[in-house]
Image: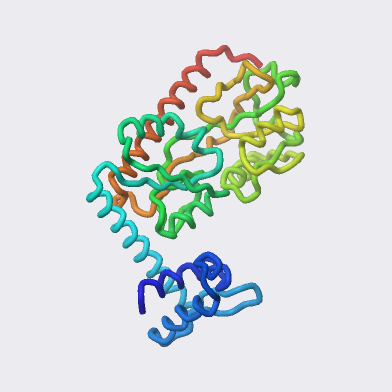
């Protein structure tokens, strides 16, 4: 049994496919299968079960998968930390997140961090959902994931950084634009641009609507929050989205108005890691820098909102 055997086995369990892992590793499917067969010979049990659309781990395979994934992630992290100790302030911080997150949540923090640590390499990997960010973390090659905080995930620690209030995005020429806030009851029956179906933010919004007894229609579904704002700006519908840091709420300039929504619980976003106590010093500094920047933006936005008169 080798470390490569375990790495390949973990990859197969996650992908559910021998051929997908073979393409990822640029090798043949029989070569991938040999790694699994070697593990099965040494353990004396069947580890994978073939199904119509790929493979799934057996009960024994699940036991080995969980242990191997945790061990490999810990080993990779230890090797990374050793590298940081050798290289001093010239290591690497690897982050995974959504496509627009860096611009909205990290731009100022990145500048601050790079000024302090000019030799450190910041690497960003784009994922399409919090779930895929968790999977990427579990693979062991990343330090941090910026996600919408949701239900507990095995082997992952989540830490909220900022709570985002929900806003209704409408065009400046919409009758609603004259208001400074919206009651959640006003959304009943309104056709809304839906957030991504597979996103944690979309699921949390749907759950909040259901709990408050609000039923709304749906004009279309989008890939991310920025696209929802763009469609609202083009007059293709109304969008309920989180109030992103740095965007004025209510917005008084340009073609779009962002109106705070009463009664909707805010959306928590923040960091996810495998283990906070095992995070490299450089990754911890970067995480703290982003958290500090987001906190300052949130406090500034809160002061601006409460400095405005409340008119309906």
Determine the residue positioned at 51% across, 13% down: 307
Q: In this view of the protein, which residue sits in the foreground, 29 or 9?
A: 29
Q: In this view of the protein, which residue sits in the foreground, 165 or 25?
A: 25
Q: What x and y, as percent, mark residue 227?
A: 66, 36
Relative vertical location of residue 295 with respect to residue 207 in this rendering, above or below:
above
Determine the residue positioned at 41% across, 56% down: 141
Q: Image quadrant for the C terminus?
A: top right
Q: In this view of the protein, which residue sits in the foreground, 111 or 144?
A: 111
Q: What x and y, as percent, mark residue 271?
A: 42, 44
Query: Which quarter of the figure has residue 139?
Result: bottom left
Horizontal side of 249 relative to 47 (left or right) equals right
Q: What x and y, as percent, mark residue 16?
A: 56, 69
Q: What x and y, as percent, mark residue 58?
A: 50, 78
Relative vertical location of residue 78 with respect to residue 204 in this rendering, above or below:
below
Relative vertical location of residue 243 with respect to residue 200 in this rendering, above or below:
above
Count of marks, rendered view: 0
Q: In this view of the protein, which residue sits in the foreground, 186 or 48?
A: 48
Determine the residue positioned at 65% across, 29% down: 168
Determine the residue positioned at 46% across, 79% down: 36
Q: How is the image coloured?
A: rainbow
Q: Image quadrant for the N terminus?
A: bottom left
């Amino acid at each position: 049994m080798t470390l490569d055997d375990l790495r390949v086995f973990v990859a197969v369990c996650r992908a559910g496919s021998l051929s997908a892992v073979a393409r990822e590793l640029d090798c043949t499917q029989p070569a991938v299968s040999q790694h699994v067969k070697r593990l099965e010979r040494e353990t004396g049990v069947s580890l994978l079960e073939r199904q119509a659309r790929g493979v799934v781990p057996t009960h024994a395979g699940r036991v080995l998968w969980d242990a191997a994934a945790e061990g490999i992630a810990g080993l990779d992290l230890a090797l990374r930390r050793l590298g940081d100790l050798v290289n001093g302030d010239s290591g690497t911080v690897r982050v995974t997140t959504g496509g627009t997150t860096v611009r909205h949540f990290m731009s100022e923090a990145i500048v601050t961090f790079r000024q302090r640590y000019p030799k450190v390499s910041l690497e960003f990997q784009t994922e399409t959902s919090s779930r895929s960010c968790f999977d990427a973390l579990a693979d062991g090659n990343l330090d941090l994931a910026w996600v919408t905080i949701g239900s507990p995930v095995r082997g992952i620690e989540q830490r909220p950084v900022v709570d985002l209030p929900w806003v209704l995005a409408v065009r400046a020429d919409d009758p609603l634009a004259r208001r400074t806030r919206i009651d959640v009851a006003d959304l009943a029956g309104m056709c809304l641009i839906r957030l991504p179906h597979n996103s944690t933010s979309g699921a949390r919004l749907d759950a909040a609507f259901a709990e408050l007894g609000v039923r709304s229609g749906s004009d279309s579904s989008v890939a991310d929050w920025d696209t929802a704002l763009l469609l609202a700006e083009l007059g293709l519908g109304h969008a309920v989205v989180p109030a992103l840091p740095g965007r004025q709420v209510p917005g008084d300039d340009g073609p779009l108005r962002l109106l705070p929504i009463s009664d909707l619980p805010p959306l928590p976003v923040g960091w996810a890691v495998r283990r906070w106590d095992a995070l490299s010093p450089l990754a911890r500094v970067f995480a703290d820098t982003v958290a500090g920047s987001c906190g300052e933006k949130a406090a500034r936005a809160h002061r601006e909102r409460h400095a405005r008169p409340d008119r309906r």
